[in-house]
């Protein structure tokens, strides 16, 4: 068993948490639109999103850490991680700040493809890193369906 590299673990956790935190700050004054939308019956209250994303950002960071410390980690993993995090960062801004519901839906589909690709790469070098991404993919599927229905209803 490898020794835990505390500095790398903290950095790996901090990156997605900070990116998510900055996105939350940018959208905080626009969250009220969620209550003004026509929502499907399966739409959770808006506060659920913060809880779920917090958990997902931690899982994202742990997966990234596990990949980075593996000798088979390549630049593609680092680039994919950064690109999916950029797409993740931009989605709530497009959805909440600009109310671009159809654009946001397509953006989520691209994000989902990036995360699936990254997850496959993780599985190839560290199975735990791959498995930790399954909740993220599941949430993106749910979020995509919710986004699509909101786009249709509004």
Image (tube, helix red, strand yellow):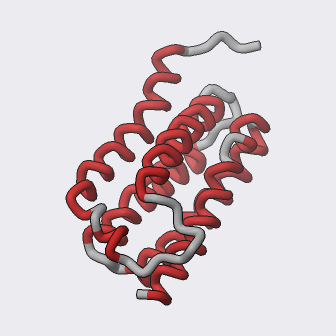
Quadrant housing the N terminus: top right
Q: Position of residue 114 (x, y in %)?
A: 59, 61
Viewed as shown, does residue 1 lie left or right of 55?
Answer: right
Please tell me in which quadrant of the rendered image residue 149 appears.
Answer: bottom right
Q: Position of residue 32 (x, y in %)?
A: 28, 65
Residue 2 seen from this side: yes
Please tell me in which quadrant of the rendered image residue 56 appears.
Answer: top right
Give the residue at the far top of this rendering: 3
In terms of depth relative to the viewer, which is nearer, 52 or 23? 52
In terms of depth relative to the viewer, which is nearer, 25 or 87? 25
Please tell me in which quadrant of the rendered image residue 127 appears.
Answer: top right
Q: Residue at x 41, y 31 (%)?
A: 14
Viewed as shown, does residue 126 lie left or right of 133?
Answer: right
Q: Residue at x 32, y 68 (%)?
A: 96
Residue 109 seen from this side: no
Q: Residue at x 75, y 35 (%)?
A: 128
Q: Position of residue 28 (x, y in %)?
A: 25, 54
Give the residue at the far left of this rendering: 29
């Amino acid at each position: 068993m490898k020794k835990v590299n505390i500095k790398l673990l903290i950095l790996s956790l901090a990156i997605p948490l900070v990116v998510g935190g900055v996105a939350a700050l940018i959208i905080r004054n626009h969250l009220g639109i969620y209550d003004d939308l026509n929502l499907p019956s399966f739409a959770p209250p808006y506060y659920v999103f913060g809880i779920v994303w917090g958990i997902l950002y931690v899982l994202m960071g742990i997966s990234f850490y596990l990949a980075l410390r593996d000798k088979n980690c390549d630049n593609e993993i680092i680039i994919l991680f950064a690109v999916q995090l950029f797409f993740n960062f931009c989605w709530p801004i497009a959805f909440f700040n600009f109310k671009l519901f159809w654009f946001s839906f397509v953006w989520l589909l691209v994000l989902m493809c990036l995360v699936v690709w990254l997850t496959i790469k993780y599985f190839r070098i560290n199975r735990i890193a791959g498995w930790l991404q399954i909740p993220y993919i599941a949430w993106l599927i749910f979020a995509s369906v919710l986004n699509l229905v909101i786009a249709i209803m509004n």
